Image (spheres, grey):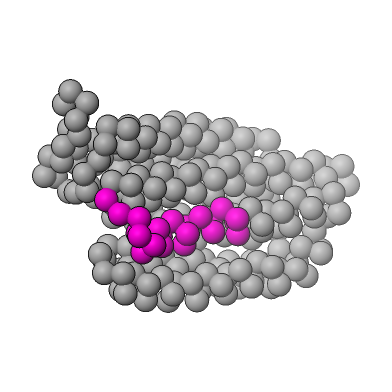
Amino acid sequence: MDPMTAGQFSLVFNAFSFTLAVMGAATVFLFLGRSQVSHQYKTAVTISGIVTLIAFYHYFRIYESWQSAYVVTNGVVKATGVVFNDAYRYVDWLLTVPLLLLELILVMRLSAQETAQKGMLLSGLAALVVWLGSPGEISADPGTRWTWWALSMVPFLIIVFQLLVGLSKSIDQQPPAARGLVSAARWIILITWSFYPIVFVLPMLGVSGGTATTYVQVGYTIADILSKAAFGIYIWVIAVQKSELSTATH
């Protein structure tokens, strides 16, 4: 374990604690918020709640693991010898990242065929991004990390293309009053997801020790809050708007 200052330890500790509260609150909000959307959008909101619930569980495990890895005595942080288990992140991402894209596809309410095609394609690519990134994350060799980072960016860039180009016609078919919200959802995904490859390369850019650990843990945590809890609530907003439009036209 990298040596940490008391400030670095506390920053990471508090980030994990804050994220636990955010994911828990978002889960309750989304499950209760299902009652405010039409039946055709309930699945999208339900998946949003499942994503934050999965994240809540894994952040609880991450929080526990962080506490086990270090002990603070008189303001001095010492490693306990128990290794911090960062694998919880990749297990979480492998489950939740594909679902995040599925939320968007479902709230768009495309045809059954297009929903299946787009959902399977984007979810599969998202899982591939996580799977290819994991060997680099656990490696201390810069060359190995760069190799796996580059490989994981291939499906990531395909996702970018699909969101910006592949979904354009489908977004044009959305109700005019909701079209801007749905289109913006693509950019929320792209902006929040861009945190991950940036944080990944920090240890390869000369950042090391406790500083690197702090930047990586806090960086990934911020990205998770934005891409899961915030995005999930945004999906709920779209679902509510489209439900109201559907009610008004009947």
Q: Position of residue 23 (x, y in %)?
A: 46, 37
Q: Position of residue 97 (x, y in %)?
A: 48, 58
Question: Looking at the image, how many numbered discs can be counted on the residues?
Answer: 0
Magenta region includes residue 197: yes
Q: Is residue 204 left or right of residue 37?
A: left
Q: Is residue 235 left or right of residue 81?
A: right
Q: Is residue 64 left or right of residue 130?
A: left
**Does any portion of residue 248 appear in the rendered image?**
yes
Residue range of the region highlighted in magenta in the rendering: 189-209
User: Looking at the rendering, which quadrant does residue 166 occupy?
Assistant: bottom right
Q: Position of residue 17 (x, y in %)?
A: 38, 32
Q: Quadrant of the C terminus?
A: top right
Which residue appears at 48% of the width and 44% of the height? 222
User: Looking at the rendering, which quadrant does residue 187 occupy?
Assistant: bottom right
Q: Is residue 102 above or below residue 215?
A: below
Foreground residue, 230 or 139? 139
Which residue appears at 67% of the width and 54% of the height? 185
Which residue appears at 70% of the width and 58% of the height? 109
Dominant SS type (magenta):
helix
Q: Position of residue 243 (x, y in %)?
A: 76, 44
**Does any portion of residue 99 appear in the rendered image?**
no
Magenta region includes residue 203: yes
Foreground residue, 91 or 198? 198
Residue ranking furthest to the top:
74
Foreground residue, 54 or 86? 86
